[in-house]
Image: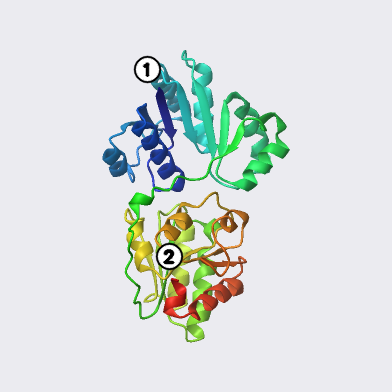
């Protein structure tokens, strides 16, 4: 079987990582696999090379019409039995490619977040009728689509994220951090509420609880990033809160960190949370439905409301645990 995986890019991101992981599973099971990226960003290129997956990409300076045209040509050339696309803008191109290509192929699109956009959802899910199946990694989104768009109810399926346990160490040394060490891994964007997390850390510093906070991520919103740097400076936390670029070695971060913090307004099935838990790293996360799927309160982490005071409460509660209790 021939499968074409369509992605917007190989930028850092949960959807991109999951698509590559799925392509590897298909390849390992004897299928002919190809990944086509609609832009040229190479963060995960080393992973594609490691898995020896056929990969091509389009130039960054192309118009949407040109990208769609070249995608149709790629479909006609490769003649896939299936096209699998992640994320909406890419899936719209995939729908057009299926419609205009001369190849009889089946299309599976995928929603990778619980976010809803009322003014756009109607248009997008109307076009999604031309897909043969729609997968989601969010229980909330599964219900939302089934209830709001009944024409898709028999086409939509819950598909949680892939987690390759072989990527994670079996024996992790006990952590001996002198101060409480927290980390965030993900895109630097407003919906992640990093400003509230930093403000909560400042409250605890003023209470005498010393915390080291490392933020790793690809900058998706430059203005927000600048505001975070300004906030860190104004609160005099420069030596305690550090911004880092996206890292290709997230396992090392999970293994050296006392807890991972994720205060998102919305999520799908979180790569970060599932990977951190695979490394035995506790979680302090926003109390949203998708995080509830992974975090059991007071067992492997704490869930908090997305307010500065409640985030501080969750971190304070975690800090009060003994070292042995934190990683039990």
Which quarter of the figure is the C terminus placed in? bottom left
Seen in the picture, residue 126 relative to 139 is either above or below; the reply is above
Question: Label 1 vs label 2: CA separation?
Answer: 46 Å
Horizontal and vertical percent for residue 27?
Answer: 35, 32
- Kindly state the secondary structure of the residue where label 2 is placed: loop
Which quarter of the figure is the N terminus placed in? top left
Query: Residue at horizontal 51%, vertical 66%?
Result: 300
Q: Which mark is residue 313?
A: none
Horizontal and vertical percent for residue 108?
Answer: 52, 30
What residue is shown with label 2? 281
Horizontal and vertical percent for residue 62?
Answer: 40, 31
Query: Residue at horizontal 47%, vertical 13%?
Result: 102
What residue is shown with label 1? 77
Q: Is residue 187 visible?
A: no
Seen in the picture, residue 31 relative to 253 is either above or below; the reply is above
Q: Is residue 305 visible?
A: yes
Query: Residue at horizontal 39%, vertical 39%?
Result: 20
Query: Nearest the camera: 155 or 322?
Result: 322
Query: Nearest the camera: 249 or 188?
Result: 249
**Left or right for 312, reference 163:** right
Q: Quadrant of residue 178?
A: bottom left
Judged by depth in the image, the label closer to the viewer, 1 or 2, is 2
**Residue at the extreme top of the image, as rendered:** 102
Circle 2 residues within 10 Å: few <14, some 14–19, many ≥20: many
Q: Quadrant of residue 35?
A: top left
**Left or right for 240, reference 105:** left
- Kindly state the secondary structure of the residue where label 1 is placed: helix
- Which comes sooner in the sequence, label 1 or label 2? 1
Q: Quadrant of residue 134?
A: top right
Circle 1 residues within 10 Å: few <14, some 14–19, many ≥20: few
Query: Nearest the camera: 82 or 185?
Result: 82
């Amino acid at each position: 079987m021939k499968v074409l995986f369509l992605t917007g890019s190989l930028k850092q991101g949960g959807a991109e990582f999951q698509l590559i992981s799925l392509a590897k599973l298909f390849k390992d099971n004897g299928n002919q696999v190809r990944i086509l990226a609609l832009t040229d960003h190479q963060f995960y290129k080393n992973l594609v090379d490691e898995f020896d997956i056929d990969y091509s990409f389009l130039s960054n300076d192309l118009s949407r019409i040109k990208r769609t045209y070249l995608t149709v040509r790629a479909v006609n050339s490769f003649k896939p039995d299936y096209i699998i696309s992640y994320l909406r803008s890419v899936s719209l191109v995939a729908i057009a490619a299926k419609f205009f290509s001369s190849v009889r192929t089946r299309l599976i699109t995928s929603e990778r977040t619980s976010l809803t956009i009322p003014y756009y959802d109607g248009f997008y899910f109307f076009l999604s009728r031309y897909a043969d199946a729609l997968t989601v990694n969010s229980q909330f989104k599964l219900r939302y689509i089934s209830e709001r768009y009944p024409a898709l109810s028999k086409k939509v399926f819950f598909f949680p994220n892939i987690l390759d346990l072989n990527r994670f160490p079996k024996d992790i040394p006990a952590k001996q951090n002198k101060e409480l060490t927290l980390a965030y891994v993900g895109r630097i964007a407003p919906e992640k509420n990093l400003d509230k997390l930093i403000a909560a850390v400042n409250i605890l510093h003023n209470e005498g609880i010393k915390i080291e906070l490392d933020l790793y991520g690809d900058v998706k919103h430059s203005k927000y990033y600048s505001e975070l740097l300004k906030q860190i400076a104004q609160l005099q936390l420069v030596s305690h809160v550090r911004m880092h670029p996206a890292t290709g070695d997230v396992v090392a971060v999970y293994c050296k960190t006392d807890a991972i913090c994720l205060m998102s307004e919305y999520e799908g099935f979180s790569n970060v949370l599932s990977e951190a838990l695979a490394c035995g790293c506790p979680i302090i996360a926003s109390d949203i439905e998708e995080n509830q799927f992974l975090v059991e309160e007071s067992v492997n982490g704490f869930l908090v409301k997305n307010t500065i005071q409640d985030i501080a409460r969750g971190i304070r509660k975690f800090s009060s645990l003994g070292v042995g209790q934190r990683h039990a």
